[in-house]
Image (cartoon, rainbow, N blue to C red):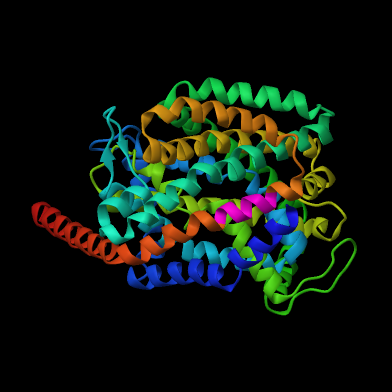
Amino acid sequence: MESVIDSLNAVIWGPLMLGLILGTGLYLTIGLKGVSLTRIPHAFGLLIRGRNGDGEGEISPFNALMTALSSTIGTGNIAGVATAVGIGGPGALFWMWCAAVLGIATKYAEAVLAVKYRETDPTGKKVGGPMYYIKNGLSAKWQFLGILFAVFGAFAGFGLANTVQSNTVSQALMSTYSVPTIVSGVIMSSLVALVLLGGLKRIAEVAGRLVPLMAILYLGCTTLILLMNFSEIPGAFILIIDSAFNGVAAGGGFAGSTLILALRMGVARGIFSNEAGLGSAPIAHAAAVTNDPVKQGSIAMLGTFIDTLIICTMTGLVLVVSGAWKGEAAGAAMTLMAFDANLPFGESLLTVCIVLFAFTSMLGWSYYGERCAEFLVGPKIIAPFRVLWVIGIFLGTQLSLGMVWKISDLLNGLMAFPNLIALILLSPVVFKLTREHGREEFTTVVKESEKSA
C-alpha cells in the first residue's frame, strides 16, 4: 500500500501539480495587478474595523478568518516545516515563501468567489466553497468538478486534519510526558465531539479565542530562540537562499538535497500548511456576515500571510539557526529538539502549542468535510459524518507518521486539481469584482473629501 501511495504522489506532486499551483497563483497575482500584495495593510484594517461584519451570514468576518486559520495553523507549521527542511534542506523554506506569496492571490480569489456564489441551505444557513462556485458560476459541462471536489474534500480531512493532527499530538505527548497514545486518542476525540455538537458557531467561537492565543504563545517562543541565536540569523538567510538553488550536501543526520527536492518539499509542505489552492478556507469564509465578496477576500488572504510568511518562517529559522535540521530527529521531534535545547521547559511549551494547533485544526476541518459531504448527500449525512470524524481522530493516534504524511500529500493533490481549474475559469469574475470595488472605493474617498472641503 505504501508503495502504491508513493507512486501516486510522484505523479500528483510532479511537475504538473507544481506548475498548476504556482502558475495559478502567478496568473491571479498578475491579473489582480498585485492588489493581493499591496493591500495587505488595508486588509488588516478591514479585519479590525469590520470585526462584526455587515450583511448576511452565520459568523463574523473575524471568526471566519480564525476558523480558516484554525485549520491551517496546525502541525504543518511545526512538523510539516521540519519535514520539508529535514528532507529538502533549508532551501525548502525559500520555495515555501515563493508558494505563499503567490498563494495570497489564490486565497483571495477563492474567498471572493465563495461569497459571490454562496447559497442558503434548507436550514437557512449560508454555505459556499468551490463546489458551490463551480455549480453556480460555471456551465453544466464543468459540474463534475464540483462533485469531484466535494468527494475529495469529504475524505481529505481524514488525512489532513484528524489523523495527521492526532498522530502528531499523540507522539509529542508520548515523547514529552510518556502519555500512552490510546489515552491521548480518547481525550482528543472526546473534546472534539463536545465542540462539534454546537456546530459552526461553537467551532468559530472556540477558534476566535484559541487561535490568537496559541499564535502569540508560539511566536513568543520562537522569537526568544531567534534572539538567543541572533548572530546566526544572517547566515541562516544566506544558507536558505543558496541551498534553494544549489542544493545542500549531507551533514550529520541530513542526507543531502537537490534543487528539485527542495522545490518539491517546500511547495508541498507550504500548501499543506496554508492550504492556498486547496479550496478549504473559502468554505469558512462563505459563512461570514458580509455582502461584499472583495472585502471578505481581502480578509481571507491574510490567512496565507500569517500562516506561512510569519509562523512557518519562524519555525524554519529556529530549525536552521539551532542546527536541529542536521540532526537525526524528524518531523515534530526535530522542532521539539530545537525548543528543548534553547528554552527552559522548551519541550513542554512546544508540546502545548502542538496540542492547541492540532485541536483547532481538527475542529476547522470537521466543518469543511461536513459541508462537502452535505453537498453530495444532503443534511442527513451530518450526524454520521461527525461520528466518523471523532473515530478517525482516535485511529490517527495508532498510525505510523510516515504513512499518514504520504496519504495527506495524496489527498492534498486530489483536492487541489478541480479547485485550481475552477479558479482559472472563473478568474475574469474575480478581476471584474476587484476593479468595480476599487472604483467604488475611489468614488467614496472623493465624496468624503468634497464633504470635508
**Residue at the bottom extreme?**
246
**Observer-nearest of 130 and 290:** 130
Q: Is residue 100 left or right of residue 338?
A: left
**Observer-nearest of 153 and 162:** 153
The quadrant of the image that shows the C terminus is: bottom left
Tell me which residue sits at (49%, 57%) in the image. 416
Tell me which residue sits at (81%, 32%) in the image. 174
Residue 259 pos. (x, y %): 70, 76
**Observer-nearest of 166 and 122:** 122
Q: In the rendered image, is residue 210 in sight?
A: yes
Tell me which residue sits at (73%, 55%) in the image. 83
Residue 7 pos. (x, y %): 68, 63
Q: Is residue 407 magenta?
A: yes
Q: Is residue 391 above or below residue 51?
A: above
Q: In the rendered image, is residue 276 in sight?
A: no
Q: Quadrant of residue 256?
A: bottom right
Prevailing secondary structure of the magenta residues = helix
Residue 93 pos. (x, y %): 65, 64
**What number of labels is visible?**
0
Q: Quadrant of residue 214?
A: top right
Q: Is residue 343 magenta?
A: no
Tell me which residue sits at (44%, 29%) in the image. 382
Residue 222 pos. (x, y %): 69, 48
Residues rendered magenta in the picture? 405-412
Q: Is residue 183 above or below residue 276?
A: above
**Observer-nearest of 128 and 335:** 128
